[in-house]
Amino acid sequence: MSLRLGDTAPNFTQKSTHGEIDFYSWAGDSWVVLFSHPADYTPVCTTELGTVAKLMPEFEKRGVKVLALSVDDVDSHVGWVKDIEETQNARVTYPILADVDRKVSQLYGMLDQTNLNQEGLPLTVRSVFVIDPNKKIRLILTYPASTGRNFDELLRAIDALELTDKYNVVTPADWKDGDDVIIPPSLKDPEVLKEKFPKGYKEIKPYLRVTPQPNK
Ligand code: BEZ
């Protein structure tokens, strides 16, 4: 059974570049980005892990812990991190899981049956799981090996998740922090609308009502 939005993220213990990680205790009360890459010492993955390293202050600002994963071993990760730091001008401060036995990648459905190693075993695809402080899976992305991910988009989606958890709003296409948001069509009571949206709102259609972002 593959994991879906709203499922509880399964716990696991696995070796990493920061020692053995028990996922739930490592995550604590934070949001988590768990993301896999196909293999160490490959070009696209090198740029991806470098980009995430540079964006760590942005993840930290949002209370998000980052955990990378591939089926390579710890020694391979440690050697490759030196290359990432040399070529991408960034320090990799987040742990990388060494999922050699594919325990975590199987649990999370990250394996790509079309991308096999020399022994014919599947490598991980470019998966991303955003997990909230209650350990619920809130966002899932899957990209093919040929296509590097856009981590600014991941931050934007995390901003939207954190905002819409706090306020009774939803976010439109291409929304970014500070832009107007949308009032869910289910909210109809004029007294509730006045209380929740003191800055008012613009009704473009009865189902499309736009209001300034509540916390700005
Ligand atoms: C890469 O990261 O460049 C890559 C990894 C696996 C397959 C294809 C490309």
Image: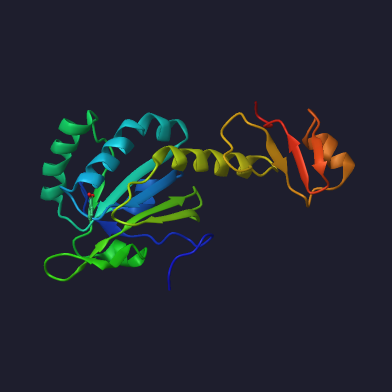
Q: Residue furthest front?
A: 146
Q: Nearer the viewer, residue 189 or 146?
A: 146
Residue 212 in percent (x, y) is at 71, 30
**Image quadrant for the C terminus?**
top right
Q: Residue at x 35, y 47 (%)?
A: 26
Say whether residue 143 is visible. yes
Residue 182 in percent (x, y) is at 71, 41
Q: Residue furthest bottom?
A: 1
Residue 147 in percent (x, y) is at 33, 50
Q: Residue at x 35, y 33 (%)?
A: 56
Q: Is residue 180 left or right of residue 191?
A: left
Give the color scheme: rainbow, by chain, secondary structure or one colour: rainbow
Q: Is residue 79 left or right of residue 131?
A: left
Vertical side of 197 occupied by 45: above or below: below
Residue 136 in percent (x, y) is at 50, 56
Location of residue 200 by image quarter: top right
